[in-house]
Image (cartoon, helix red, strand yellow):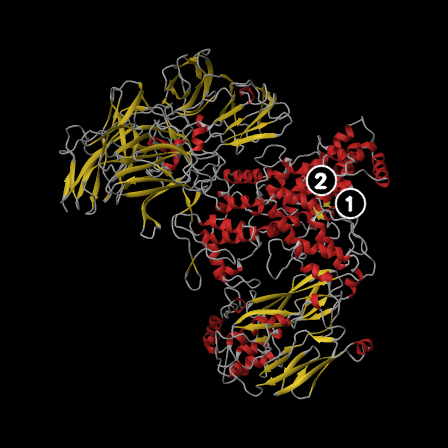
Amino acid sequence: MKRSHLFPKVCAFFTAFVAVFSSVFFAATSHAQFNEPELRSLSQTGAQIGSSIELSVLGTHLEEADRMHFSHSGLHATVKPGEASPAFGQFVVQVDKDVPPGRYDARVIGRHGVSNPRAFLVSEFANVRPANVSHDVNVPTPVAMNSIVHGNSPGAANDYYAVHVDGSGASTSSTLRIELLCQRLDSRMIGQVKLLSPNGRVLASARGADEVDPMLVVENLDAGDYVIAVNDYLYRSGDDYPYQIAIRDGQSTFPLCPGRQVGPESFTAPREIVLDDGDSAAMRVASPVQKIALPFDGTWTFASGHEENAFEFEANQGEEYSIEVFSQRLGEPTDARFLVQRIEVNDAGVTMLHDVVRADDSHSVNDGVLNTTTKDPVALFVAPATASYRLTIQDLDVGESIALRQQYVLRIAKPSPTFELAAYRAFPHNDVTQSRPHGSRLARGGTETIRVVAVRRDGWSGPIRVSAEGLPPGVTCDRAIIAANQNQTQLTLMASDDVLGEIASIRVVGHSEDDATIRQATPVTIAAVKGGNREFTRLRVADELVIAVSEKDVAPVTVRIGAQLAESSTIAEVKKGETLQIAVTVNRREGGSDPITLRPKDLPPGVTAPEITIAGDKTDGTIVLTVTPNAAPGTYSLWSQGETKIKPTPESPPLSVFLSSTTATIRIIEP
Amino acid sequence: MSPRLFAWVTLCLGLHLGCFVPSVAIATAGDALRFDNHSDAVHLIGGDARLQLVISRGETSVDKATSVDKATSVDEARSVENATSENTAIARSRSIRDVTHSADIRAEPLGIVNISSTGQVTPIADGTVTIIAKPQSTDVELQVECEPATMQLTVSGIGSEPPLSFPHRIVPIFTKLGCNSGGCHGKAAGQNGFKLSLLGFEPREDYEHLIGESRSRRVSPAVPDQSLLLTKAINASPHGGGQRLEMDTDEYRQLRRWIAQGMPYGDDSAQKVVSIDVIPGTRRLAATSTQQLAVIATRQDGSTEDVTSAAVFESNDTAMADVTARGLVQIHDAIGDVSIMARYQGHVTVFTADVPRVTQQPLVFPEPSNVVDTYVFAKLQSLGIPPSSACDDATFLRRACLDIAGRLPTLEEVESFDADTSSTKRITLVDRLLETPGYADYFAGRWNTILRNRRSRGPLQFSTLAFYDWIRESFANNRPYNEFVKRILSASGTVASNPPVAWYQQVPDTNQRVEDAAQLFMGQRIQCARCHHHPYEKWSQADYTQLAAFFTTVTKKADHDPIEQAMFTRVGGATSPHPKTGQALAPAGLDAENAAIRADDDPRVALSEWMTDPSNPFFARTVVNRYWKHFLGRGLVEPEDDMRMTNPPSNPSLLDALAEDFVNSGYDLKQLIRTITASRTYSFSGDANYDNLLDRRSYSRFYPKRLAAEVLLDAVDEVTLSRTAFTGMPQGTRAVSLPDTSFDSYFLQVFGRPESATACECERSQDANLAQSLHLLNSEQMQTKLAEDSGRAATLAADDSRSDAEKVTQLYRLSLSRSPNENELKTMLTHLSSKTNRREAFEDLIWSLLNSKEFLFNH
């Protein structure tokens, strides 16, 4: 078996840098990561347009938090002055008058970098936070109509508010629209809201769920004082259980947040697709069968229960169409499945249906943290004959507890092969289930990683070249390849030794080989870790991907592997059935002299590589890739996760850390 | 092989077996004795043949009271009801009397048959005889009044010993002796190395085990008497099951002869039993009387045979009657009705008897309020049982509140109900209670438990709460019951959107699903049929498998929480393999044709449509019976979720009428409750009178019920003014409002709160025991509640605005919904004045009330 050698002549290697960590840097951590700030909650999760509010932040590694970063430039925060120094973590937030209503990302910047985002809702309504909220239904806390009330889950109790409704009958003033926002505010709270009549009878109630907030619209109320009860459905509480309750009359029907809170899989739904919010949609049920002409794009409401929704269309032999249903990704509690059948009427006049294509869940990519699978179906349809076809759509989620009417958009169009990307800051740990919200702090000479997943649409099958753009000066990032048979990769940001501190909103962009297709990745963030009896990590689409570069810190260990995929550099080639040695260089400094174990990641199919350990007194090693004959030719990017221990100070006990190497790119060729 | 070659007992009547079964409603024998199991001539073939005579002294009049029990329509019942008053005395004096064991029976000529004192005929020689039955010579009255009964009997085949069939001759002996019962060799692992199929449902396997195993020592053709099969059965060899057989018995002789014949397996088809009947099928009997039964089997070839000696008998109420191994029913000193199941070769049939009270006094019934009273009164009339008087208003208020809302009446309710002079105030009360949150809480809790909605891990669980809330909302909004069941059975999606999906999460196994669904919604306990033919029903493994096939395409889909996964139906044909043959069976309901289901369809939709169809004989009857038990304390079928053929309802006409009314109401559960609670029957006093004290099944009075655990705890909390805290729930949450049964509470546990581990109502215990008494009398929890600073006793003691008499009255009205009588008030006031510590004195008063039976029971 022939070996190829990358190091030192063929490949460029990275150097590793070791620095002495400050004691502050490692303070208060039991299994040290790099202490990126984690913003758990804001004391107030929104404000009225044109207003100024005070808020404080809660989280870990938020020392010296003196700035905030919002995803809209019309939102400003200044740290409150203290007696001797600024009152770190306490801010005055100003919402400019030209900020459109909606949800924005708020981040905190402190000694350890920039935090993960938390939602901040800007609205036209007065925002209030009562000093004391009543838990006694008989003495509810009074609140005003057309206001937004801030609170925190009371735990095993209810928060009770009293609101006065004017008028009676069918006037808009007799309508009460109560919207409880929790999940959309990155709260762990699963909201439940009830409206009680003046005599204490429950008139209406609604509960949310994971990624769903409840809303009540109660009409034809008599004039009087009504009680609103709010609680977490599981009666949990904590500072990460904030809520807002928007109490509006019938004149305010516009959504406070654009659309419902939905999961990260929504990034595969084009943003221009929105659901009807009127009664017209309710009338559009495709039962009995609806005749449509292709291409087709329309919004419908699912028939009730287990009933089918059916369409018929004509297609000529060989015509190709992409058939896609958008519903769950738009926030509807649905689970669609469809079947296309060719209609044949035989000589006896009997109609026969022949299955052509069937589709259920789609866009399935799961890296253990980010799962892009949607319950919306999509399939490529190629007409086997010139004929009439029947498209039958079933909603497998026949429940009505979240929404009585459930809508979907049916889009049938000529295929347009492309890809969609999502990117998030990967939590540095060897167990992805430990992932949690965290921010960014790129130390001098250090690395941070961005995980990128790709969803291929309409038969897109080419490789995708992924890169980071908008990086601050002194920060570089090797491009990475998502090969044709892969759907994820990792970018490693690396700061130079003399990088200056900066906060930057960066972009992750994917290119097709011929650059004809360029797609910007949708930023995703971890909103909640598992816990509170919800055994999963919750993610959501974010407004931006923000990194912080620290000029005050130096990374203790940096690992570089293989060839750097520079614009003009060569790519190490290896033939199927052979092995490839990739050189590793570790730079160590004081506190970083422990052995380091390296585990190769994102290996191409058919390629194996055992983990290696580089002794504490060594700085070099070699990763050996074994390329089996079954490996597919192509260009691939791989990296290595390192696990080692560092000592913040000579007296400190060793702390375990996980770090990512730079990325290497190889090309597998036929023998 | 010709049937004549078998040494069987064959009754060659040449008539349809139905002619065999006497109709109680058409008793035509006058005052003469008669052979109930004889119509023309009887032919016994072979020395093993037996005939169990059933001899009775009949009546000439039409038994209208009995025909009430057989009525199948409301109109029919009403017409009978109109007739019952004038015929009361007749009805109570016209019991048909069984004289099988007391008659003088002889055969002429002698030497053809022997007849035992119990009426069993044994052939001994070929020939024809006349059997004559006369009243005992000591019974002068009968000798004078009664004509003797005669019948012709022919015996043939004596001396020829055709091979005995293993499945048709030997296996029934095993069953009769209990060898293949579930507690002995019939259990899955067998017993001490010898395994038989349960109740002999797999004779071929039994044969292989018996002949082929244990180095063939079990049977020895050369020395049959040394066969282990025989030596163990007579306990000559050590046998864990003890002696099962005497040597001088027909069974021993048959087993021995079969071994001596070389253990033939025999014909497997022609002699297969296709049905059995019991004679008589139904009868009115007097208390302490007896009734001999005979069991007739019909075989595949159409022949019939007396199998009484080989059949197994079982009483469904041993307090009413016992039955011997030879089919002699002994009625105890009781009134009511009882069923005796007879089983032979996998077939079952039932003898039912009603036992009226003997009296010549005319019965007086109130005007029936509705269909409930029509049939209950008819039954009581038939049995001669007088009803108790109506309960007073205070009792009714307490009863209705506890039964409908699971709580005591409030003081305000007691006072306003007392002050209400309206004649419809009881109906109004029920209507009002049905609209309170308490009704939804209480019934949601009951259903939640048997739907097994219980968290699988520590803190409150989303799916548990969501499903509970959905159930509760269903009751609050009075969702039609058929819709309620459909939504559960065909649940698809996420639990957040479709909470009934939680049922599929909680019941994750297909077998459990089919068994739970059958038991919950159809009262059919079909789990036996998973492994073998149901021993007490007609359900086969194929029936079970086809019902299970509806669930075979259910699968789960990963959702956010790995524990709370979404459920849906995958595409594909729903079939299930027969456990024995492996044949793929299509979905089918019980006693229903195969369902036509497309690959993309959800089979459970078809299941739910079949199950909730008005023509389904199980669906509506099961739920009305369940509710009947909730309100009246005892199901028309008991247990309420075991509605098998061999466990008939005590008042079938009432069950049918209630079910019909329920279906016609649109499966309206609130209306069902209104119907039951608006009846005079529900309003009967719980106090028995002299003549209905023995009644346990006919609802002549209200049967007191101990308060359910949750209701009792809430009641204690209310009276002591000390709320029990439940971890994770808001302060003030009532026990009946808890979303599952996982909350830690010794009180609830000791008072029989179910674990919610099965779909069976039997998990809930409402029995009384010593631990309960001790807990109420002297537990730390009770003492804490009584002595709480903000509790009732402290509040009353500190209240100087009212007199002690007023306070005592309030306590009585709060806990018992009535005012104290003069003696009670005097006693209480005396105690209060005797103690210097007023707070302790009130604690004592409350303690005594809480420990009174009147408080602990809904009466």
Q: Which residue is identified by label 1? A: B391
Residue B291 location, x and y as percent? 70, 70
Residue type, numbered disc 1 = Cys
Residue A220 location, x and y as percent? 57, 25
Residue type, numbered disc 2 = Ile
Residue A184 location, x and y as percent? 44, 27
Choose between B249 and B799: the one closer to the eye.
B249
Q: Chain of mark 1?
A: B
Judged left or right of residue A188, residue B832 is right
Is residue B54 among what the camera can see? yes
Q: Which residue is identified by label 2? A: B427
Is residue B852 among what the camera can see? no
Rendered residue at 77%/58% (across/down) = B384
Judged left or right of residue B389, residue A135 is left
Is A371 rendered above or below residue A41?
below
Corner quadrant of residue B382: bottom right
